[in-house]
Amino acid sequence: MKQFVIAGTLVAGVALAGAAMAQAPASQPPAPKPAAGAPKTTGTTQTADKPAAQRPRRQAAAESAAETRSPKAQPTTAEEPTAPGAMVLGTVRLPKGVKVDGKDIAAGSYQVRLTADEAKPDARGASEKLERWVEFVKGGTVVGREVVSIVPATEAKLVQKDTPPPSGGAKVETLKGGDYVRVWFNKAGNYYLVHLPNS
């Protein structure tokens, strides 16, 4: 009789435990472990390793910097250079015959005068004011005209490669290859360059 009471008690206990389990909510499966180095997750919200309070502040600062970023300042465009008026550049001695505007002139001394006539430069972007005509004068007669390139004093150091003539002086030299003679004047800091082909 005692055995039946114990068995009955056990059956009743098992039945009650089964009923309690049936009424309890279904447990959720364990969440998968994140991979090494991956950000930590809590529920469906993903957070970085940094505290959540700092992240919005940094994002706002980055967005603000992106909005207020302005383009870099560009260098100012150089002002249109001013060229001098007509004047005598000086006297030069040509050691050999050259061509001036397609005409042969003999070796000898010539006075070179800058005119007010502008030449049309071949180079795109060159200023017409800095491409002018010079006259080669011998015995008071103009024997030929040629284009001179004027380099303003403000730009002289940017283009200077050879030793320039002294201030107020002139220099005549045969260029490398021997095909051209360069007549170079230094007047008030400006350079005046004339390139003459050999005749």
Image (cartoon, helix red, strand yellow):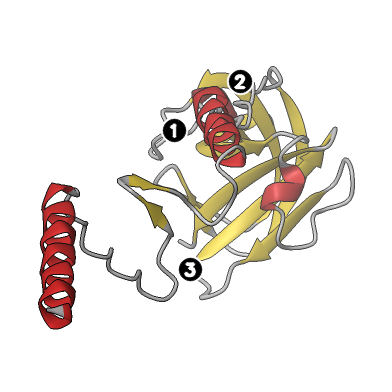
**For marks 3 and 1 on the same chain, the one whose residue lies earlier in the sequence:** 1
Q: Which residue is mark 3?
A: 179
Q: CA distance from mark 3 to mark 2?
A: 33 Å
CB contact under 8 Å: marks 3 and 2: no
| Residue positioned 18% across, 65% down in the render | 13
Where is residue 155 drawn, in percent x and y?
71, 39
Q: CA distance from mark 3 to mark 1?
A: 27 Å
Question: Residue 38 occupies which quadrant of the picture?
Answer: bottom left
Helix, strand or loop for disc 2: loop
The reply, left or right, for residue 12 in relation to residue 111 is: left
> Furthest-front residue in view?
1
Q: Quadrant of the N terminus?
A: bottom left
Disc 3 marks a residue whose amino acid type is: Asp
Depth order, front residue of 174/128: 128
Q: Nearer the viewer, mark 3 or mark 1?
A: 1
Disc 1 marks a residue whose amino acid type is: Gly
CB contact under 8 Å: marks 3 and 1: no
Q: Nearer the viewer, mark 3 or mark 2?
A: 2
Label number found at residue 80: 2
CB contact under 8 Å: marks 1 and 2: no
Q: Report crowding for label 3: few under 14, some 14 to 19, many 20 or more residues within 10 A (C-alpha).
A: few
Q: CA distance from mark 1 to mark 2?
A: 12 Å
Helix, strand or loop for disc 1: loop
Where is residue 140 drawn, in percent x and y?
68, 29
Q: Which residue is mark 1?
A: 125
**For marks 1 and 2 on the same chain, the one whose residue lies earlier in the sequence:** 2
> Furthest-right residue in view?
167
Question: Residue 153 occupies which quadrant of the picture?
Answer: top right
| Residue positioned 55% across, 26% down in the render | 64
